[in-house]
Image (cartoon, rainbow, N blue to C red):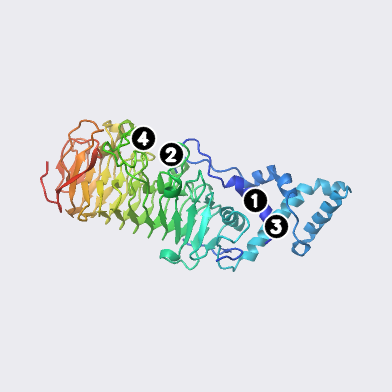
Amino acid sequence: MLVHTLSLAALVLPIALSAPVLPVAPTSTTSSGISNNPSAAQVSPVAVPPPSPLILALSNFTALFNSAPLPSRRDLSDEVEDLLIFDQAEAGGEYDESRVLGKRAVKKDFLTRQAQIQAQRAIGDSCVGPDSSTLPIDYYISSLFYYGGAGTTVWLCQYAFINLTNPIWFFNSNQTLATVGLPSGPARATLTVTGVNQSCAIYGQGQIWANNIALRNVQIDGGRPALGIIPYGVGNLALIEMGGINTGHTIDSVNAFEPRGWSTLHGIEGTLLSCKGMVVTNNQFGPAGHAPSGSLQFRKRDNTGTYTAGQWADGISMACQGSTVANNVITDATDGEPSDLLVWSALTRRNPTGGIVIFGAPGSQVTGNTVKSVNRQLMGGINMVDWGPFSGSFTGTVVSGNTIFAQGNFIKIGVAIGGMVWGVDNRTIARTYGGTVQNNIFRSGASGYFGYSIGIAGHANATISGNDATAANFGSILSPNCYNFPLPTPQSFVADEWTTPGSSLQPNFFMSTLALLICRGPGPIIARFGLGATK
């Protein structure tokens, strides 16, 4: 491996690929595994992309270049031979004005050429493992994408365990990161977050030309049990950040769990809501975060349980319009809003989150997914409650054929629709609207239960039909930290007819004045398998 190839990567990547600077939060072992075969495949506000790697390189060029030894002559082209002669002459005190004037250009060309040579030599190599480079492996993988250009695929070795201290970045269109052979199960390479202040492992939304990139058949350990949560509001990112000013991103057959930040996968909407057509299929996400285990549920100063409020995290947070979220399994994704529930604004992104949180994402299909609570309680299974970033619109968004499974723990609401389910803002301007929720199944294990299967309030023009909760248990108690507002008995389907104008609801909805349906805490099961009073 060429020393100066590494110098260029070291020059560019440690700066460019550090965890992105945010204005405000949410605010095996071959030399390489790169190929040039195209693969078919945010936190809000949008994270600020890094400065140009070339600008960063030039600004630090002389010191970093001169500190590195030169490669052997057998690896050098003619102009690099001239550079070698020049450096030797310079060391001996000789002077050549033309060479001095061309020094920076020649050195930049040398480093770029050697990086290209390294990439070419890597073609045909089988895979990248933890020892594939003397560089930090995250920088090395990102450099392969940076210098490989559009259509680059970086193959990771099967069963490889790769520790990251910075995110891996995509840089151009049709780039893919995947385990060689596209295996499922434990053969997939495992990327583990290990940086002290790191929450993000994959960053795919930082470049405006990175369309049709793909993340396939890998495992990603977010590191929360070992490193702890990164508090909301101090720059945390989701474990996987995709989307942005791009189209056609694919996340397929990925197993990702224990994010340190607010979500496992974030499909960010991008500047001017430009993200379109993300495909999220066949993944396993979770566990993610912890629900509060104290008696008050939401109050941060409640320390009566093992986990205080504010440690939730999502499975999927989708704000990319026209996307497909299908055939994923979300387990123990606990929800991700760190603020006190009673002070949320209806006109900003609440990040109320759940197994799957849909931030409008007009025209998206969310189908065939399974969201389940096994060992951790969920605030919501699938949530459609956020006014931003699409000004309340869920037009064309269809949630169908999903299974919400309270297998061994409590799910407050199976599918939550409208801002009044999550808050108290009853202004017409604050209402969300549109979307279809149909043919979803809600069921429980022996010790699992719901507060409500579907709750809708503060949402106009929804269509809800064909949903089945006959195999679900219901229970819970009112949380003592919420408003003293009467809530219906735990049951399958509840709606507020006064705040859901233009909506078409299936016939078995109980109508009641509703707000803050999530103000329920763990409690006894009072109705099994859909039976019990409706009041």
Relative placement, left or right, of 214 versus 141 is left
Give the residue type that dot 1 points to: Ala
First in sequence: mark 1 or mark 2?
1
Q: Is residue 492 visible?
A: no
Disc 4 is placed on an element classified as loop
Front of the two marks 1 and 2: 2
Q: Could you tell which of marks 1 and 3 lies nearer the N-terminus?
A: 3
In the picture, the quarter occupied by the N terminus is bottom right
- In the structure shown, which secondary structural element does the residue marked by tag 2 occupy? loop
> In the image, what residue occupies the spot 21% across and 54% down?
444
Query: Residue tagged by mark 4?
Result: 339
Residue that mark 2 sits on = 231
Q: How far across and down, in percent of the image, does residue 139 sit?
A: 58, 52
The residue indicated by pointer 1 is 10
Residue 368 is tagged as none
Instruction: Determine contact: label 4, label 1, CB under 8 Å.
Output: no
Q: Secondary structure at mark 1?
A: helix
Residue plotted at (44% across, 67% down): 183
Looking at marks 3 and 2 on the same chain, the residue that comes earlier in the sequence is marked by 3
Q: Secondary structure at mark 3?
A: helix
Q: Which residue is mark 3?
A: 3
Q: Residues within 10 Å of mark 2 (few under 14, many from 20)?
A: some
Structural distance between the alpha carbons of marks 3 and 4: 49 Å
Counting residues from the N terminus, which is met first, the one under dot 3 or under dot 4?
A: 3
